[in-house]
Image (cartoon, rainbow, N blue to C red):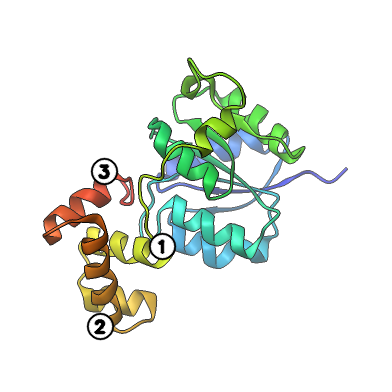
C-alpha cells in the first residue's frame, strides 16, 4: 500500500527535522520548506496528500500559502501546527481550507492521529482549543468572524511591508508595479480605518501575518 505523501513547512529547521523523524516510519515526507512562497511554488510538483504547515512564516505566511495551495490543489489536506491558540485564527484557517489545527505544544502522537484522520477525509482540532465547545468543533470555528477581512493580494502586500520591505521591493517580489502596491496599501488602511503605516504594521503583527 502506498504511504501518504507529506510536505512539511516551518521556518524553524530543527522543528522540521524533528517532524520528519516522527512521521517517516509511517508516511513519506516528500519535501520540507522554510518559507511560504517556496512552499506554494514547489508543492504542486511533489503531489502531496497532506501539507503540515505553520502560520507564521517569512515571505508568505501559512494562511495565505494555504489559500493559494487549495486553489492549486483542491484535494490536498492542510494541517496547521502553530503557536497561535487564538480561536479566531483557527476559524480563519478552517474557512480557508484547513482540515486540522494543532498547537506546537501538542503531543507528537496527536499529529500522527490528525494526519490519519485527514487522510480518511475527516477533520481534527486539538482538544487544547476546544474546551467548552459543543457540537461540531469545525462548524464552531468556521462561524467565527474573520480577523483579517482582506483579499489574498492585500495580505501578501501587508506581509511584505510588515517585514520591512519598501513598496518598490514588495512590487518586485509580487511582480506588480509600485503603484499597485501603494493602491493596495491605502485601500487596506481605508478599509481597516487605520491612519498610519505604523498602525498598519501593528495590525499585521496582531493578525499573525508576520513570522514571529
Distance between the Cα atoms at labels 1 and 3? 17 Å
Judge whether 81 appears above or below 135 on screen: below
Dot 2 crowding, Cα within 10 Å, few <14, some 14–19, many 20+: few
* Closest to the observer, 87 or 212: 87
Mark 2 to mark 1 CA distance (whole Å):
17 Å
Whether residue 172 can be seen here: yes
Q: CB under 8 Å between callouts 2 and 1?
A: no
Disc 3 packing (10 Å; few <14; some 14–19; many ≥20): few
Residue 143 x, y percent position in the rendering: 50, 37
Q: Residue at x 26, y 68 (%)?
A: 187
**Mark whose residue sits in front, 1 or 3:** 1
Say which residue appears at 27% left-offset and 63% top-offset: 188
Q: Which residue is mark 2?
A: 179
Q: Quadrant of the N terminus?
A: top right
Q: Earlier in the sequence, mark 1 or mark 3?
A: 1
In this view, the residue in front, 135 or 7, is 135
Q: Earlier in the sequence, mark 2 or mark 3?
A: 2
- On the image, numbered disc 3 is attached to which residue? 206
- What residue do we see at 52% from left, 54% from top? 66
Q: Which residue is mark 1?
A: 151
Query: How far is mark 2 from mark 3, CA to CA?
Result: 26 Å
Find the residue positioned furthest to the right. Answer: 1
In percent of width and height, residue 53 lies at 51, 46
Q: Are the two marked residues, 1 and 3, in contact with CB atoms closer than 8 angstroms? A: no
The dot on residue 194 is: none
Q: Quadrant of the C terminus?
A: top left
**Image side of residue 47 versus residue 21, left or right:** right
Q: Secondary structure at mark 2?
A: helix
Quarter of image, res 19: top right
Query: Where residue 58 sits in the image (x, y, percent)?
Result: 35, 56
Amino acid at each position: 500500500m502506498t504511504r501518504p505523501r507529506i510536505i512539511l513547512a516551518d521556518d524553524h529547521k530543527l522543528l522540521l527535522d524533528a517532524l520528519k523523524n516522527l512521521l517517516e516510519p509511517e508516511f513519506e515526507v516528500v519535501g520540507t520548506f522554510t518559507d511560504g512562497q517556496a512552499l506554494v511554488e514547489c508543492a504542486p510538483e511533489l503531489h502531496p496528500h497532506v501539507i503540515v504547515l505553520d502560520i507564521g512564516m517569512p515571505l508568505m505566511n501559512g494562511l495565505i500559502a494555504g489559500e493559494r495551495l487549495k486553489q492549486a490543489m483542491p484535494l490536498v489536506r492542510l494541517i496547521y501546527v502553530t503557536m497561535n491558540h487564538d480561536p479566531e485564527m483557527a476559524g480563519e484557517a478552517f474557512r480557508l481550507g484547513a482540515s486540522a489545527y494543532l498547537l506546537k505544544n501538542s503531543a507528537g502522537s496527536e499529529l500522527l492521529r490528525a494526519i490519519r484522520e485527514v487522510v480518511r477525509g475527516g477533520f481534527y482540532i486539538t482538544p487544547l482549543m476546544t474546551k467548552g465547545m459543543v457540537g461540531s468543533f469545525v462548524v464552531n470555528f468556521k462561524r467565527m468572524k474573520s480577523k483579517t477581512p482582506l483579499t489574498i493580494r492585500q495580505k501578501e502586500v501587508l506581509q511584505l511591508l510588515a517585514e520591512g520591505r519598501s513598496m518598490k521591493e514588495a512590487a518586485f517580489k509580487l511582480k506588480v508595479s509600485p503603484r499597485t502596491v501603494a493602491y493596495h496599501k491605502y485601500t487596506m488602511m481605508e478599509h481597516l480605518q487605520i491612519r498610519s503605516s505604523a498602525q498598519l504594521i501593528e495590525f499585521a503583527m496582531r493578525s499573525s501575518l508576520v513570522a514571529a
